[in-house]
Amino acid sequence: MSFSLFGNALQCESGGSHVSISQFPTVCKRAIDNRTWVWSQGRNAWRLSLSQKSERIQTLRRWRMRTKLAWSRVWGRWLAIVSLSVACSGAIVTGKETEKKSHTTTAPQELRAVWASTLSPCMNSPEEIQALVSAVRRAHINTVIAQVRHRGNTWYNSEIEPPAPEWSERKGFDPLATLLREAHEPTTGAQRLDVYAWFNIFSFGDPDSTRTKGLGTALRHKIRDWLSYDTSGTRTTFLDPGLPEVQEHLLSLIEECVRKYDVDGVNLDFIRYPETEAGYHPRAIERFNRLYGRSGTPSPNDPQWNEFRRAQVTGFVRRVAATVWSVRPNAVVSVCAVGFGAPAADGDFTKSAPYRQVHQDWAGWAREGCVDIVTRMGYKREHVAAHAKQFRDWAALSRRLQDECAGRLVTLGIGGFFNSTTGTLAQYRVAKELGLGTSLFSYWRPTVESDTTKAYGAESPFWDLLGQEIYPEAVDPPRPTWRNAVATLAVSVRDPKGRALDGAQVSVSGKASKQERADGNGWAVFVNLTPGKYRIEVKSGSQRLVREVEAKAGKVDFVKLTLK
C-alpha cells in the first residue's frame, strides 16, 4: 500500500489498485498493524510506503533534508501527508525531530530495561562497560539499570560508603561516570541510553564479611546495630526500616549520587522487609508502642503492627521521590516490585504476598504517584504450567494497574536466569501483547543457556535475537511528563530544639485533602497534588500549627515548620 502526492492530488494504491479518499481510513486501518514506514525522496513527490513483509515495525533510517530551501518548497505537501498518516496511526514524527533522533520512532512510552548486577562482571573496568552498552544496543533495549550500591560497597565515587574492591584499585576510573559517558554520548547513529542508579536499600548482608572490609570501624558498628531482628530475636541481614537513622543514611547515599551524576533515574531494590517476619529491632518496637499507645511485643499478625511496617517503607519511598525530583526533575523514580506466588483471584492487591508478607505496597505507590515506574520482578518459570499462569495473572494485574495510573508505568520483570531462550522470548511476547514495558534480570545471565555455553554477558547470542524477534526497532526511553502538571509538598515538622516530631499529624487541604503521620525524621510528603494554594495543618499532642502555601506544577516545594 502506498500514498503519493503529485501536484495537488493524493493517490492511494493498495495491491496494485487505486483507493479513493473515502476508502482511505478503512484500508489504512487494515495495513497499519505491524508496519514499516519507508520514506523516499522523489523529484516532485514525497512517497509513503507501507511494507507488509515484516510482522513487526522495522524503522529504516529516515531521509535528511538536503537543504533548507528544498525543505521550504515541499513543506506544504509533506504536511498534508503526515497529517493524514497521523490520523490513522499516530506513528509519525516531524522532520526536525526525525533528524535529531534518526534511530527511533514515536510510540507510546515503553521501558525496555535490563538489570546490570555488579555481583557479576559488568562495571569493573571500561572494557566491561563498553561490552555492556554494546550488547544493550544490539537488543534495542533503551535503559540500563546499573547496580551502584549493595552490601556497603559502591560503584561510584561516594564519600559515605567505600568503593567496591573490584574497581577501587583502578586509578582515575569511576564506573558510573564511565557508564554514563558511554550511554549518553553514543557514536554516530547509535541510540542514547538511559541509566538508572540501582540501590539495594534495606538488604545489606553480613557487615563482618570480607566484602565489607572497606566500611571502617565506625560505619561497621552502625550497620551492625541497624540490622533488624526476627520474632525469635535472631539478627537478620536487613537493615530495620523502622529506625529513622537507617532511612537518613540510605537517603544520603541516593541524594549524593543524583547530585554528583547525571543519572536518568534511580531504582530502589529490596525496598521492603525480608521474607521472614522481621522488624523487631528494640528501638523500632519502642517507636511503634509510643505512636500507637501500646506496650509489649506485637505479634506478626497484628494489624497495627503491619500498618506501621508498611508505613516505614512507604514513607521512605515518598522521601526518595521528593529528594530525587527536586534535584533532577526529569529523573525517574522506580522500584523493584516483588511478585511472590500469585495475585489474589479478585485482584485485591492487599491480599497479595508483597503487601502482606514483606509490607511492600507497590500498587499503592503507583496509584498515589510517589513512583514513576514499577519495575516488577515477577520471575516465573515458563516451562512450569503453574508458574506460567502466575506470570500471566500478574501481567494482567500490571496492565490494569498501569491503566489506573495516568503517566506511571508498570513493567513485566522477566527472569531469564530461570528460563530457556524460548521461554524468555515467550514472556517478552506477553508483555508486547499487553503493551507493557519490560525489565530483564539479568545482563550477565540473560537465559539459562549461558550456563551451558559459557556465553555470559555481551557474549550471549540472546541480545541479537531479542533485537530481531521482539524489538526490531529502537524506541526512546520513557520520560515522567505526567509530573509536569502536578505538585509535590514535602513538609518537615520539628520542635523548638530542632528534634523531629515523629508521628505528628500533618494534613493538607485545598485543591485536594490528604493526611499523613510524619515519619521518624519528621517528614510528611504529599505527591500528585493539583497545583494551587494549600493549607497545611500540623498537630502534635496539644500543639497545633497552620501555614498557607502554594504548590507549583512540576515542582517539589519544601516546607519546614517548627511547633513552638
Image (cartoon, rainbow, N blue to C red):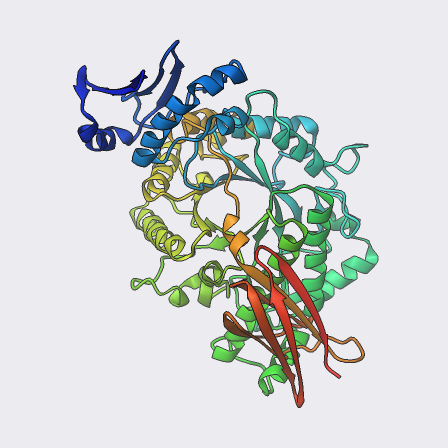
Could you say which quadrant of the image residue 503 lies in? bottom right
In screen coordinates, is 405 left or right of 162? left
- As rendered, which of 134 and 323 lies closer to the eye? 323
Point out the image quarter for the N terminus.
top left
Q: Outermost residue, bottom direction? A: 542
Residue at the image position 37 percent from the left and 11 percent from the top: 44
* Rendering coords of residue 333 (x, y %): 57, 51
* Rendering coords of residue 394 (x, y %): 36, 53
Point out the image quarter for the C terminus.
bottom right
- As rendered, which of 64 and 109 lies closer to the eye? 64
- As rendered, which of 235 and 541 lies closer to the eye? 541
In screen coordinates, is 272 left or right of 7? right
Query: How many numbered marks have been drawn onto this rendered protein structure?
Result: 0
* Rendering coords of residue 135 (x, y %): 53, 27
Residue at the image position 36 percent from the left and 36 percent from the top: 90
Q: Is residue 182 visible?
A: yes
* 417 up-or-down from 366: above or below: above
Could you say which quadrant of the image residue 416 lies in? top left
* Rendering coords of residue 221 (x, y %): 78, 62
Q: Outermost residue, top direction? A: 43
Residue at the image position 82 percent from the left and 53 percent from the top: 216
Q: Is residue 234 visible?
A: no
